[in-house]
Each structure stands twice: as structure tokens, then as C-alpha cells.
Image (cartoon, rainbow, N blue to C red):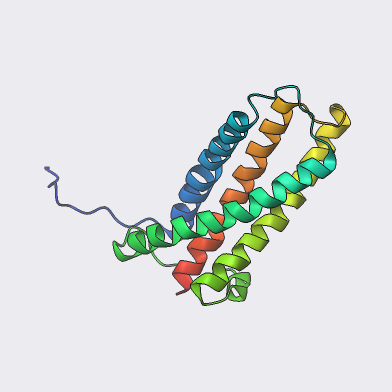
Amino acid sequence: MEVSATAQKAPKTFSAYAANKCLIGYGLVNGIVNAAVFAAMHAAQPEVGFGLPDIMMDLTLTGAILGIILFACVVPLTRHDMNAARFARPEALPSFVRLLPRSYVGAMLVLGLVAAVAAVAVGLALALIVGIVLPLPLHFVTMMVLKGCVCACIGALSGFLTISYVVRG
């Protein structure tokens, strides 16, 4: 039995689409990229230490910027995938998605704020856990790994919220 080149695949379920995009694309890849950017920024100062205030300030700014940039990138990509029927619309979205403003700029700013708060929360938890094993201030490499992990989590969260915003319409 031959399969024609024009045969279309069945669309993914929303959860499969979101999991693939959020965990791998917006999460894992984003964490690696942010860790690499951090390494490049601080390569000239490998002996620098990061105390808790430094960690929180860095993660707050990174979270806000990450949320806003990811929103700006993911909205058109998700709209394109939705129009191309690459995934099936979900029957229902999580109720917290209704809290996002309908306007593009409003939703972008709210997502930036959510990402900043989440980055601080996740970063603080990880920094305290790491701080039990490794004393503060954190070494350059430890901070790079911490930032990569936090950015992976925040990227996945921001990606899911953005995809849900687009699907909600």
C-alpha cells in the first residue's frame, strides 16, 4: 500500500502539542541557550561569586525579559500551527488562562510579570537547596547551571501560558 506525498497526518492533541513545544522547545532549549548566554557574559570573570541578592536580581530580570520575548515569538508560531491544523483545539483550557488579558500587550506584560515572579520563586528554591550543599556565594559554573534550570522551567511555563492564550482566542 502506497502512501501519497500529499497525505496529511492527523493533528496532534493539544496536550501532546503543548508538551512537545513547552518541555523541549521553550523549556529545555531555552534553558541551554540562557545558560550559554550567561557563560558568554561572564566568561571574562570566572571567579565571580553570586550571593542571594545577585541571584534574585538576575533571575527577576531574566524572567521578565524571557516571558515577554517568548510571548512575542510564540504567539505567531502558535497561530500559524493552529491555522495549519497541526493540533486539535482542547475541549477546555485551565481556568487560570481566563485571567490573562485579551489584549496582546496586556497579556504580554502580565506574562512577563508571571515569569519574573516564577523565576524568583523557582530560583530561590533551587538556590537554597544548592546552598545547603554548596555555600553561597555561588560559583560561576553553579550559577550558570542554576540559571539554565530556572530558564527551562520558566520557558516551559511561559510557553504553555502563551499557547493557551492563543488557543483561547
Image quarter of the N terminus: top left
- 151 left or right, relative to 138: left
Instruction: Give the residue drawn at x 79%, y 41%.
Output: 54
Count up the numbered dots.
0
In this rendering, the answer to whether 22 lies above or below 41 is below
Seen as rendered, the residue at the extreme front is 44
* In the depicted structure, whether residue 64 falls above or below residue 134: below
**In the image, residue 71 above or below residue 21:** below
- Let me know if residue 120 appears in the view: yes
Query: Residue 80: which quarter of the image?
Result: bottom left
Q: Is residue 93 left or right of residue 133?
A: left
- The location of residue 2, given as percent across then percent down, is 11, 43
Q: Looking at the image, which residue is at 54% across and 42% down?
A: 30
| Quarter of the image that includes the C terminus | bottom left
| Residue occupying image coordinates x 46% and y 53% | 16
Q: Is residue 53 above or below residue 92?
A: above
Res. 91 in view: no
Q: On the picture, is 60 further left or further right than 128?
A: left
Q: Nearer the viewer, residue 84 or 60?
A: 60
Q: Nearer the viewer, residue 43 or 3?
A: 43
Residue 164 at x, y percent in the picture:
51, 65
Image point (66%, 61%), residue name: 114
Residue 25 at x, y = what percent?
Answer: 47, 45
Question: x, y percentage for residue 53?
Answer: 83, 44
Looking at this view, is 36 or 2 the one in front? Answer: 36
